[in-house]
Image (tube, helix red, strand yellow):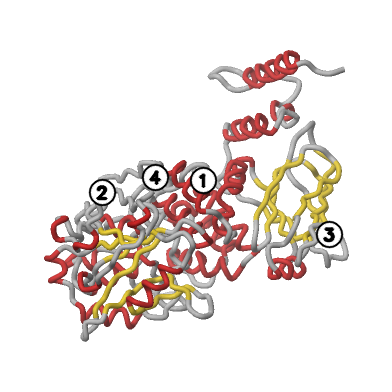
Amino acid sequence: MATSKGALSTTLFLIAISLFLALPHGGNALKLPFRPTDMVPPLPQLLSRPILNYLHARKSSSPEDPLPVFVGAASASNTANIHWKAPCFNHNSAWLELHNKSRTPFGGGALHINVSKAHTWYCDDSYLFATAYRVTSDYFFLSGEHTIEFDQWVSKAELEYVKKTGVSIFVMAFEMMGVLDMLKEVFPLITSAGWSERSNVNFLNKRMEASLLIRPLRQWVANVSTDSIHSGDLLAVSRFSGRRGGIQTLEKWVTGSYAGHIAVCLRDAGGKLWVGESGRENDEGEAVIAILPWDEWWEFELKYDSIPSSIALLPLRPDLRAKFNESAAWEYAKTMDGLPYAYHNLIFSWIDTMKENYPEPLGDPHVIASAMTVWNQVQPPYAANVWNEALNKRLGTEGLGFPEILEELKRRESSLAQVLTLPEQDDWVYSDGKSTSCAAFVLGMYKKAGLFGPLSSLIQVTEFTIKDAYSLKFFENDTRRLPKWCNDPYTILLSCQILGKYLMELPGYNSLEPYAHMNERCPSMPPKYRRSEGC
């Protein structure tokens, strides 16, 4: 017999009342003949998942509880299934089948998972499935076989990875499910070159309340005269499509920056204009520090993408331009040229506080720990490069892998949340040299060129984000002194936009005088990204 909408609504209403009565309200909770969590999974996922998250949030838990647990990697080459126990189902197994149902060059696969022997009615287990090229998730509350379809592998490299390593399986905590939902929105930003301009713009509109006004077509490319560009002038860059645009979008969201990259201008003794930046890809596809002639740099930017990057020139103010030591700047640039980009300390300029650098649904340092746990399993070299060395430096240890780092923190009665907030030091040298982001490279040059004056030894530029860099009160504050060719009637800042479909917004631009230990304890919560005094 068909169930009427009214009957369904009444049933859901009665279940909701039962759940409400079971929750603590300052007195003794009503004893029910079942656990509330046993009744929730049969509800539609839109209802069940938030309720389960809430119920689990009410429980006390140790800091390690939300971390994903690696149970094994299912591979087509395995002679036997992998087996494990989970919080709900005691008997679980998995195996991987390779197929080509999609009739694509690299084919696809199906991950078969069998779950049984649940310890209670309708409990469920949440899972994350990962290769080095993708992450997906699901949860199971019914016994039997379940199938996770991979319609097609993204490349030959992923196919070879799956053949050799398999699909890694992690049991997840309930607290992570909101993050996994978020992955559906943001994961393509860093994995797909086809991520569209519209998706990036919508993401920034939604999560940062960025306006991203479209400029008149005739002003997308300025008629730049390099005679008006000087040593020390800053270039702020934003991309809105492709893999690099997606990465910049994520970085903007977590740091509050309205630019995704910065570079610095330099003139040599003969007057030739150059551009220095950290993050330029070399012929091997590696991101490195590079010093390029202006003409080469500008030609690349004009042709980089079908959607022009937005680029603004931020001229130094006259007193600092006169103070800028070109010889010292060039000496610094030459010692840094060719060194790798700042993968080692990339996340540490962003994370300064225990809780106020994690936008929803990240919301918690455990999410970072979870990401580290997953990538430590599926991409060990990546994990070592991006955070293990930096964490070892903060602990005063050497060579510890991520699991050993967690053990060391436990032994010291500390936490990952605490150690992530410890400031990076500019003089730290990693296994492949100094590690500098685009912001740290530019500001390191400013240090050497004398712009920080006596504060140089009291400021760690590796703690600065891109927003921190352009917020320094170092730049031109008089529109009459801007180059004539950048007098754009749509300009709303004292900067000079030289390229781009979208107007460059830089909230907080040119507003902060430097001070000791600047940007070592700053929150960065969207959408307002308010700074605390003296952070």
Which tag is nearer the camera, tag 1 or tag 2? 2
Mark pair 3, 4: CA separation: 44 Å
Decide: few, some or many residues near mark 3? Use Cα within 10 Å; few <14, some 14-19, many ≥20: some
Q: Is residue 467 above or below residue 460?
A: above
Relative depth, front residue between 470 and 236: 236
Tag 1 residue:
362
Q: Which residue is mark 4?
A: 210
Which mark is nearer the camera, 1 or 3?
3
| Residue assigned mark 2 | 492
Q: Position of residue 288 (x, y in %)?
A: 44, 75
For the residues labelled 1 and 4, the Cα–Cα distance comes to: 20 Å
- Residue 173 image offset from top left, x and y in percent: 64, 44
Q: Residues within 10 Å of mark 2 (few under 14, many from 20)?
A: few
The answer for how far apart the CA atoms under marks 1 and 3 are is: 33 Å
Residue type at the position of mark 1: Leu
Numbered label attached to residue 97: 3
Task: In this rendered view, identify the residue nearer to me: 120 or 158.
Answer: 158
Q: Which circle's residue, 2 or 4, is located before the other in the chain?
A: 4
Q: Are marks 1 and 3 in contact (CB under 8 Å)?
A: no
Query: Which of these two is toward me, 395 or 479?
Result: 479
Quadrant where the N terminus is found in the figure: top right
Please state which of residues 59 and 519 is positioned toward the viewer in this rendering.
519
**Dot placed on the residue nearer the N-terminal end, 2 or 3:** 3
Q: Position of residue 171 (x, y in %)?
A: 69, 49
Q: Quadrant of residue 456?
A: bottom left
State the SS at label 3.
strand
Identify the element where label 2 is drawn: loop
